[in-house]
Amino acid sequence: MRLAVTADGQALIKSKIVPTPQDFDQAIQTFKQTADELTQGEKVSGVAGGAAIILDPDKTKAVRSTHLKSWINKPLKAELEKIFAAPAYIENDSHIAGLGEATNGAGANNNIVAFFNIGTGIGGIRIVNGKMDQGYINFEPGHQIIVADGAPCDCGGFGHFESYVGGSGIEKIYHQKGENISDPAIWDEISRHLAMALNNTIVHWAPDIVVLGGAVVKSIPIDNAKQHLATLLKAVVSIPNIVPAKLGNEAGLYGALELLKR
């Protein structure tokens, strides 16, 4: 868990990182204790954040999660509002990180931002004029098919973007974790699969810029992906700028700050 506080709604003044408990009740306790430490007893007027969960339509609880299974169907929004006596706003972690990058990071000052969070899995979102695009709660760009009848995905599908470029997929295909792969030919192949997804994203979402975040991006040769994309993408006049994210692990905190501003 990464927690931060803001006094003026414009800047983060203090933050702290603590291990995320898998047990929901323990997680709420840890959240409260850490927040109390950061606020030093001052009244909280609003809470916002993201988690590695798929939310219900009203954004009150997790309905699916690969990593936080005991959180599923637990009253996350209600518990946060109860312990702080303040309104709480919850988003998926990739979505809120995309909002942070679009408003305060690498995508700032662009009208349409496409964001991919490439970690163990892959999430993403389209930000339009500083706001999450309509229907964003159902965006799953990591599960677009880039190889027909291809490698299996953790979701049960086959040939997905996540199966070839996500950390879990890379480990299954190459039998080692991405951080242990040094062969440039392997990374070039991964960058080629990234280019396929970028092609699809550009022709569907028409972004002014594509921002790539997440741990795996640090290892992917983005210039290689751009070269592959130049070969693949023929349907548009110009290729948008493709850049690594700027805010790192604080992207979600800046996205949360943006929610609180509104």
Image (cartoon, rainbow, N blue to C red):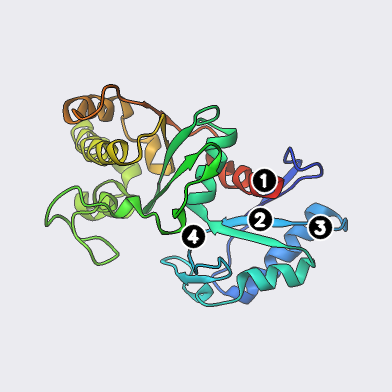
- In the current view of this chain or complex, which residue is farthest to the top? 238
- In this picture, residue 84 sits left or right of residue 165: right
Disc 2 residue type (three-letter) = Ala
Counting from the top left corner in percent of width and height, residue 194 is at 27, 39
Q: Which mark is residue 44?
A: 3
Residue 85 makes an appearance in the image: yes
Q: Is residue 208 above or below residue 16?
A: above
Q: Earlier in the sequence, mark 1 or mark 3?
A: 3
Task: Please identify the quarter of the rendering in which residue 185 is found.
Answer: top left
Q: Which mark is residue 52?
A: 4
Q: Residue at x 60, y 34 (%)?
A: 104
- Whether label 2 touches label 1, CB < 8 Å: yes
- Whether label 1 touches label 3, CB < 8 Å: no
Describe the element under mark 1 as helix, strand or loop. Answer: helix
Disc 3 residue type (three-letter) = Val
- Whether label 2 touches label 4, CB < 8 Å: no
